[in-house]
Image: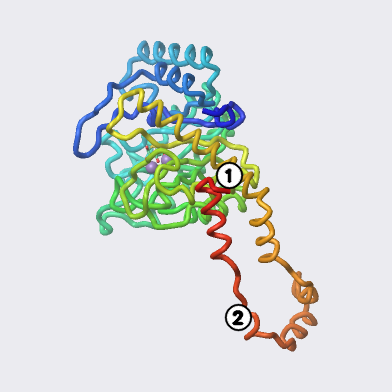
Amino acid sequence: MSDQYQPQPEHKFTFGLWTVGNPGGDAFGEDVRPQLSPADLVYLLGEVGAYGVNFHDNDLIPINATPAERASILKAFKQALAATGLKAPMATTNLFADPVFKDGAFTSNDARVRAYALHKTMHAIDLGAELGAEVYVFWGGREGIEVDAAKDPVAGIRYFRDALNFLCEYVKDQGYNLKFALEAKPNEPRGDLFFPTTGAYLGFINTLQYPEMVGVNPEVAHEHMAGLNFMHAVAQAWEAGKLFHIDLNDQNYARFDQDWRFGAQNLKQAFFLVKFLEDVGYAGSRHFDAHAFRTEDYEGVKDFARGCMRTYLILKEKAARFAADAEIQGLLAEIHADDGSMDAFKGAYTAAKAAALKAHTFDRIGLGARGLQYEKLDQLVNELLLGVR
Ligand code: GLT
Ligand code: MN
Ligand code: MN
């Protein structure tokens, strides 16, 4: 292995406790790996070279832990962070596993469940802040329906807004340095989830009381489940100043949420995603929200984690090659060439400009007849990715 692909802290590669700690059980079969403690998972992540570890409140502290159990788990976890130098840059709340949330948390029809969800989240925010988290993720795993008759979707949106406004005030009140990142998913585990795509959240954020505190956490697999171009969702979030976090993984379109190793399935999409993040200078965590195949033991889990980071770094190097490739850049220069003949029509509207543009005669046939050389360009990209240029 060449050193160039070794993860370094500045790459900001992070994993959730629930990712490398996933014991491999699924809807059809039992766990295949023993459950490791949070501290042991930190040591595993230290061994493979990750920068940080993220967690749900209950990944770290079981929901029914006694105060003494809580204290001892926390002590061991903090010792592991100190020993490995790992950071805990993101935290989140488990608002989906316990039966109390079977019909939603912030958007439950039951006011007692909605209040409990706020109570649980404030405690989880305290835990995240104590461990140094600066991003707090909201994935509404149970915020949705199987039965449309049961819920008013507009009420769901209002409840969710009320909860976020309340929690933004809570964070300000405590003086925490914490931003919120909303994570969309179209379905699973509910039949339909509210806010199914990153774009839906981008529209919603501006209706909040403190929109500057709230961004998004797009996940590859979730946009792929909806059949969307993930890089485009990320680009829109970036352009809006809302890309606070990102969940990297992989899977094919039209599947359930498989959460595979980054780059395991769609290398070309992964390439354009890495290229985008690196080109714009995204400075946040590169969080791998994925887990090892069920076929693996803990050596395989390390292979999985190393593979996520190594693929990212290889694709980052490919992006640099793309930028330095004279033939690709020459083609791009031709494709984007501007002969200046339309300069008079550019920029802000004026009545005179509109009149001149309306009066202009265009060579419509000639413009439509040009070949754009995208076949050549795409083949060059393929050859670059296949390692022959
Ligand atoms: C869960 C989900 C992920 C979310 C996590 C954060 S938990 O594994 O599938 O996409 O990011 O709550
Ligand atoms: Mn997922
Ligand atoms: Mn995720």
Identify the mark nearer the N-term, 2 or 1: 1
In the rendered image, residue 218, in percent from the top left (x then y), is placed at 48, 46
In the picture shown, does residue 116 fall above or below 250?
above
The three-letter amino acid code for the residue at tag 2 is Gly
Q: Using the image as rendered, state which of residue 358 and residue 107 is in the foreground.
A: 358
Residue sitting at x 76%, y 85%: 355
* Residue density around tag 1, few if under 14, some if 14–19, many if 20 or more, within 10 Å: many
Where is residue 109 drawn, in percent x and y? 31, 47
How many neighbours does mark 2 have within 10 angstroms: few (below 14), some (14-19), or many (20 or more)?
Answer: few
Image position, residue 333 (x, y; %): 70, 62
For residue 264, what is the image quadrant? top left
Residue 362 visible in image: yes
Looking at the image, the residue that sits furthest to the front is 388
- Which residue is label 1 attached to? 318
Q: Which residue is mark 2?
A: 368
Residue 195 seen by the camera: no
Looking at the picture, which amino acid does disc 1 mark? Lys
Tell me the SS state at disc 1. helix
Find the distance from the CA under tag 2 to the CA under tag 1: 33 Å
